Amino acid sequence: MSILNTIPDPIRTQLSGELIFSAKTDLQHDGHFGEQWVTFTEQDISVWRADGSSSMTLAFSELKEARAVGGVGGGTLLADTAGGPVVIARYTAALSSVFGFAAKLLTAMAKDEERPAMSEKEFPRYCPTCDHPLLDGTQVCPICKSKGKVMARMLRYAKPYKSRMIMAAVLLIITTVIELIPPFLTKIMIDDVLQPRTAGSTLMWVVLGLGTTSLLMAGMQSVRGLIGVWVGSKLMGDLRDDIYKSLMRLSLAFFDRRQTSQFVGRINSDSEAMRQFMTDGVIWVAGETLRVIAIFIIMFGLDWKLTLYALLPMPVMIVTSMKLWPKIGRRWYQQWRSIFRLNVLVGDSLQGIRVVKAFGQEKTEMSRYTEANHELVRHNIRIEALWQVMFPLFSLIAGIGTLLIWFNGGSEVIGNQLQLGTLMALIAYLAMLFGPLQWVSQMINWASHAISAADRVFEIMDTPSEVPEARDPVAIGMIKGDVVFDQVTYGYEKHHPVLKGVHLNVKAGEMIGLVGHSGAGKSTFINLICRFYDTDEGRITIDGSDLRNISQSDLRKQIGVVLQETFLFDGTIAENISYSKPDATPEEIMRAAKIGNAHDFIVQLPDGYDTKVGERGHRLSGGEKQRVAIARAIIHDPRILILDEATASVDTETERQIQEAISRLVKGRTTFAIAHRLSTLRNADRLVVLEKGKIVELGTHEELLAKEGGVYRKLVDAQTELSKIKGVEG
C-alpha cells in the first residue's frame, strides 16, 4: 500500500515491521502546534516526535476499533481498547480527511476486514508556493492567487460592449469637466460681478452659464445611466449564462459533495457583485480619480499655499482608512457567511417542508432560523456600526482642512491679499475633493467584494468534470443494446468501493433484474450505465464501444430512466411527460401515458394533461408521479431501459397494470430493472444477485430459487415470510 508521507530516516530505522501507513500531524498531544508522526505496521501503532524519539506505542492486539472524532478547528484519532479509548493523535481541520481514512484503515485491520484503498482525494493538497492548504475542489491558492489576473478575466466580459463603455467613459470625462465649472463661475460672479458691481448683463451671462452646466450635466448623466443599465443587464445575462452552463457541464459527483442552495447565490448574488463592479464600480472609480486630479490642478492654480493647508488632513484620512480596512474585510466575510448559512437553512427546511410537518418540527426549524437570523443581525449591526462611525470620522478630519482654509484664507481676504471669490471657489473644490477620498475604503471593499465573488464564480467555471466529454466521440447511431461490464470497480469514495470487479455480458433485448440487500450496489450499477459516474477500474461498453468514447448526449438519447426518487418539474403533466421529447405531439404524449397506465387518472383531473403538478410534483400522489415518470421514459423510446424501483410507490393493482405495460415496453429493448418486490422480476431473462458490491449469483428466477441456501433463495424466503406477517397483521 502506498504511503502518504515519506517519513524521516531516524523513524524508519526504528520500525518493528513493514510500514503500512504514515502521516504527519500538526498538533502535539497537549493541543499545541508541533510536528509528530503516526505510523502503522502489522504489529503496532506508533507516534513519533520530530527528533525520532517515540512518544507512544500501541500493540494491534489491543485494538478493537478506531474513530476520528471531529472538533472545533480540528479533531482527534482515537483507538478503542479493552482499557478504554486511547488518543493516538490530534490534528487541525486541514488533516481531517487524512485521519478519517486512518481510522477506517485501523478499524478494517482490527476486524480483519477488507482494507480500504488510498485515494488522492483523501489527503490535503498544499500550494507549492506558500504551502497553504488548498480548498476541496479547487487548484487556486487563496493566498497566492493574482488579484490582477482575476480582475482582468472579469473585465473580459465587458469586451463585447467596449464601444458603449467607451461612450460612457467619454461622457463621464465630459461630465466630470462640466462639474468643475460651477465653482469657477461662482468665483467670477463674486470677484468680477458682485464686488465691483458690474452691469447686470454680465451677471445674466454668468447665471446662464451656471444653468447651462446644470442642464448639460443632467442630460449626460441620464444618457450615461441608460448606457450603464443596458451594458449591465447584458453583462449580467452573459455571466449567469456562463455560470449555469458550467454547472450543467459538471458531473453528479460535484453536486454530491455540495449543498445545491449555495449555487443559487453564485448565479444571482455573485454575478450581480461582478456586474456592479464592472459597470458602476470601474466607471465610478475612473471618474472620481479623474475628478481628484483635475481638482488638484485647479486648486494649485488658484492658490497653492492654501491648497497645501487643505491637504494636511489627507495623510490622516488615508492611514485611518488603511487601519479600518482589515476590520471591514473580516466583518464583510462574517456577514457573507451568516447570509449563506441562513439561505441554506431556509432552502433545506422549505424543500423538506413535508418532513418538517410530518414530524411536527416547526418549532425546531423556527428556533434554528431564529438563531441563524440573530447571528446575521449581529454581524449586520457590527458592519453597519463601523460604517456609521467611519463616515462622521472622515467628515471631521476633512472639516479640519476646511477650517484651515477658512482661517488662513479669511485672514488673506481681510488683508486684501486674496479675493473672496477665490476663497469661496477653493472651499467648494475642497468639498468636491474630500468626497471621493472618504470613499477610498469603500472602493477597496467594493473591488475586494467583486474579486471574491469572481473567485467563487470562476471556481465553478474552472472545475473539470469528473465525467469529461469525449474529445473525438464515436458515432454510435441507433444502438442494438449489447452491454458489457468488464471487471468494473467503482466507489463514491475511492477507498471504499461499492462495486468490485463486476463482470457481466448483457445481450441486446435482454431483461436483467438486479437483486440484493440495500447498499449492495444496485443503484450504482445503473448509474454507471448512464455514465453519471466513470468507473475507477475496468470499463463498460455498449455495442463494443467504451462509454468514455461515446458522446454523453448521444448515449442518453438512447437510455430511458425511471429513477427510484421520482422528480417532476413545476409544470403541466404534458410538459413533464414530453420532457425528453419537447416536440412530442399530443397524440404521442397520450399514447405514452396509456402505456404507462397514467391516462385514466390524468383525464379525471379538472385540467387533464394541462394540470400543474406543483414543485417536485407535490400535487400528485406517489403512484401518480411514478406513472408520469414511466410515461416520460416511454416517450423517449429508448434502446436501453432502466427501471430503478419503478413500481415502488404504487399499490398492488396499479403495479400489476404497470407490469403489463412494462412487459410490452421491454420487448426489443435491453432492460435493467431493480424492484423491491422480487416477484415482479420473475419475468426477467436473468437475475444478477449483488452482495457487498460483487456478483454472487447469476441466473433465471427458477434457477436461483432452486439453489438451497443461495442468496436469492434467502431473499425470497425472507420476503415471503414478511408478506405473511403483514397479511396476519392486516
Image: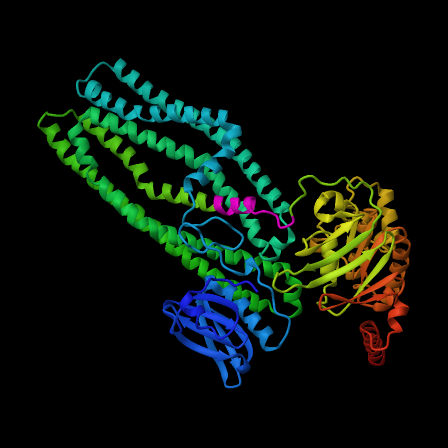
User: Where is residue 191 shown, x and y percent of the image?
Assistant: 19, 21
Camera-nearest residue between 679 and 597: 679
Is the N terminus in the top left, top right, bottom left or bottom right quadrant? bottom right
Q: Main secondary structure of the magenta part?
A: helix
Extreme-left residue of the structure: 415
Judge whether residue 573 can be spotted in this image. no
Camera-nearest residue between 20 and 150: 20
Judge whether residue 307 can be spotted in this image. yes
Compared across the picture, whether 479 is left or right of 224 comes to right
Residue beneath the point at 51% across and 34% down: 157
Extreme-front residue of the structure: 13
Vertical relation: 584 (above or below) 665: above
Quarter of the image where one finds residue 538:
bottom right
User: Where is residue 255 shown, x and y percent of the image?
Assistant: 61, 54
Is the C terminus in the top left, top right, bottom left or bottom right quadrant? bottom right
Vertical relation: 690 (above or below) 407: below
Vertical relation: 369 (above or below) 17: above
Compared across the picture, whether 63 is left or right of 388 comes to right
Q: Is residue 200 magenta?
A: no
How many dots with numbers? 0
Residue beneath the point at 66% across and 44% down: 469
Compared across the picture, whether 354 is left or right of 159 comes to right
Q: How is the image coloured?
A: rainbow
Residue beneath the point at 84% across and 42% down: 586
User: Where is residue 385 shown, x and y percent of the image?
Assistant: 35, 53
User: Where is residue 620 shown, x and y percent of the image?
Assistant: 76, 57
Residue beneath the point at 23% across and 20% down: 188
What residue span does the magenta drawing correspond to? 454-467
